[in-house]
Amino acid sequence: MRCSPNCPEPEWFVRMIDGKITAEQEARLIACLDMCTSCQQTLLQLESEQIRTDLQRSSHDAQRMKNREVERRLTQLRSERSVHRMATSEHAYTDVMP
């Protein structure tokens, strides 16, 4: 059953999901959702898309954090290697000098 010939635009449900509508607007949307299978399907689809987007964002964020940690560790290893080289070359230099 449809709530009316003019169901709310999907944007209104997006705003509701994001908490960006007034209490009165939300009440109207909920009234539509209570009796309109079309609106219910629209909301379910939007929520699924939001969940998918959130999961993708979380995955990208986790990958960025992992990449930053790898870069940090590489920098640390390069620095340690550089210090080791300097110490080794100083030791070699003092071994050659009389």
Image (spheres, helix red, strand yellow):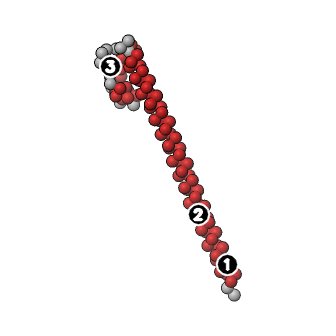
The quadrant of the image that shows the N terminus is top left
The quadrant of the image that shows the C terminus is bottom right
- Tell me which label, 2 or 3, sits earlier in the chain: 3
Instruction: Determine which residue is flagged by label 3.
Output: 7
How dense is the environment of label 1, judged by Cα within 10 Å: few (below 14), some, or many (20 and up)?
A: few
Instruction: Determine which residue is flagged by label 1.
Output: 92
Nearest the viewer among 17 and 46 is 46
Q: Residue furthest top?
A: 1
Image coords of residue 97 (percent x, y): 67, 85
Image coords of residue 50 (percent x, y): 44, 32
Q: Secondary structure at mark 1?
A: helix
Residue 60 seen in render: yes
Q: Residue at x 42, y 21 (%)?
A: 41
Q: Amino acid type of disc 1?
A: Ala
Q: Residue at x 29, y 18 (%)?
A: 6
Looking at the image, do the residues carrying marks 2 and 1 touch, with CB atoms under 8 Å apart?
no
Q: Residue furthest bottom?
A: 98
Q: Secondary structure at mark 2?
A: helix
State left or right for residue 24 relative to residue 91: left
Label disc, if present, on residue 78 of the rendered structure: 2
- Tell me which label, 2 or 1, sits earlier in the chain: 2
- Rounded to the nearest angstrom, the CA distance separating label 3 from label 1 is 82 Å
- Rounded to the nearest angstrom, the CA distance separating label 2 from label 3 is 61 Å
State left or right for residue 3 relative to residue 51: left
Is residue 59 shown above or below 91? above
Nearest the viewer among 26 and 57 is 57
Is residue 7 shown above or below 78? above
Q: Residue at x 35, y 20 (%)?
A: 29
State left or right for residue 96 relative to residue 16: right
- Tell me which label, 3 or 1, sits earlier in the chain: 3
Image coords of residue 5 (percent x, y): 30, 15
Task: Report the mark closest to the observer, 3 or 1.
Answer: 3
